[in-house]
Image (tube, helix red, strand yellow):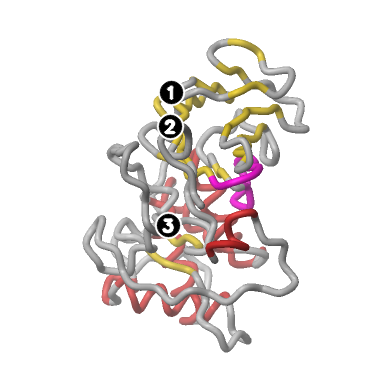
């Protein structure tokens, strides 16, 4: 059982810290900070416990194995949901992927910390609905039925959500170079802000040269059915097809966007051949 020499933790506290610790071990060090931000939330004590486990592991001070090895994925995800949402009667949103990482299913359809092997896009066939989040223990690529969530009357609704009840995908950014190479990011209608923070519309957590918030933005205008790329309000620079971006620039299929060490190819879904109605 994993433990820190000389430190005593309650069983419940230890299980929570150990589960997050096991997921962090499977990530490169450059991605662990964003993962801990998401998994630990505002619990500073929990984060210190997990970071202590990681430090002890790096120094060879942990014994092999984990108390959570006896639990299956669904049990672990349910436990973390209970820990993070003790007073909420509704179902929480934390999921655990097959590699042990915890993520918020309302922000990501698949684990954002695991690389995606590739992306196949058929420009002539529109997607009828969003891909459902993968349920714990299900096979890769197998959609699970989901219950549509009611509108939040106090939230601002996007152009398509007001009409269709969802924000459908209108395109993708595919990382072809950088720490997150092979991963794809969905583009929705209107403005999609890019940064390392999990709250960004497009979160690129593995590149520390990308600003935490609003490094840049990809905009889809449903009226003109066109895309544009703009620089955000940070000090960092961005390039489109090797040209410094200083004002909004139109995006064409397979244009190359450069942010920090990350290179992204733009793959449109909406355009001359298709537009959501």
> What's the residue at 26%, 68% (across, down)?
137
Front-most of residues 128 and 185: 128
Q: Give the residues in magenta.
A: 188-200
Tell whether 112 sits left or right of 140. Answer: right
Q: Is residue 248 visible to us here?
A: yes
Secondary structure beneath dot 3 equals loop
Q: Is residue 147 above or below residue 64?
A: below
> What's the residue at 29%, 37% (across, down)?
118
Image disc number at residue 267:
2
The location of residue 60, given as percent across then percent down, is: 38, 49
Residue extending farthest to the top is 243
For disc 1, the marked residue is 254
Tell whether 225 sits left or right of 98. Answer: right
- Mark 1 or mark 3, which has the lower sequence index? 3
> What's the residue at 30%, 39% (across, down)?
122
User: Crowdedness of circle 3 by 10 Å Cα count: few (<14), some, many (20+)?
Assistant: some
The location of residue 162, given as percent across then percent down, is: 62, 63
Front-most of residues 252 and 178: 252
For disc 3, the marked residue is 109
- Mark 3 or mark 2, which has the lower sequence index? 3
Q: CA distance from mark 1 to mark 2?
A: 6 Å
Tell whether 69 sits left or right of 133. Answer: left
Callout in the foreground (3, 2) = 2
Count of all numbered marks drawn on residues in the image: 3
The magenta stretch spans residue 191: yes
Q: Quadrant of residue 90?
A: bottom right
Q: Is residue 123 above or below residue 132?
A: above
Secondary structure beneath dot 1 equals loop
Please say if the residues under marks 1 and 2 sit with CB atoms less than 8 Å apart.
yes
């Amino acid at each position: 059982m994993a433990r820190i020499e000389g430190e005593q933790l309650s069983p419940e506290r230890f299980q929570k810290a150990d589960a997050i610790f096991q997921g962090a071990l499977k990530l490169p060090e450059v991605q662990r900070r964003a993962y801990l931000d998401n998994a630990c939330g505002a619990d500073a004590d929990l984060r210190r416990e997990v970071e202590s486990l990681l430090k002890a592991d790096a120094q060879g001070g942990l014994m092999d194995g984990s108390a959570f090895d006896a639990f299956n994925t669904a049990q672990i995800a349910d436990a973390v949901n209970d820990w993070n949402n003790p007073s909420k009667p509704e179902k929480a949103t934390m999921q655990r992927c097959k590699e042990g990482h915890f993520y918020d299913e309302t922000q990501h359809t698949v684990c954002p910390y695991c690389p995606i092997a590739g992306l196949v896009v058929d420009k002539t066939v529109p997607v009828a609905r969003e891909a459902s989040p993968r349920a714990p223990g299900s096979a890769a690529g197998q959609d699970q039925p989901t219950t549509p969530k009611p509108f939040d009357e106090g939230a601002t609704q996007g152009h398509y959500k007001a009409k269709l009840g969802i924000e459908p995908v209108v395109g993708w950014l595919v990382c072809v170079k950088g720490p997150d190479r092979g991963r794809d990011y969905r583009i929705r209608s209107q403005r999609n802000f890019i940064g390392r923070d999990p709250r960004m519309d497009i979160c690129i957590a593995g590149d520390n040269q990308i600003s935490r918030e609003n490094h840049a933005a990809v905009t889809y205008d449903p009226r003109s059915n066109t895309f544009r790329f703009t620089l955000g309000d940070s000090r960092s620079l961005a390039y489109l097809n090797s040209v410094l971006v200083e004002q909004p620039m139109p995006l064409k299929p397979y244009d190359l966007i450069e942010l920090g060490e990350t290179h992204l190819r733009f793959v449109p879904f909406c355009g001359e051949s298709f537009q959501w109605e």
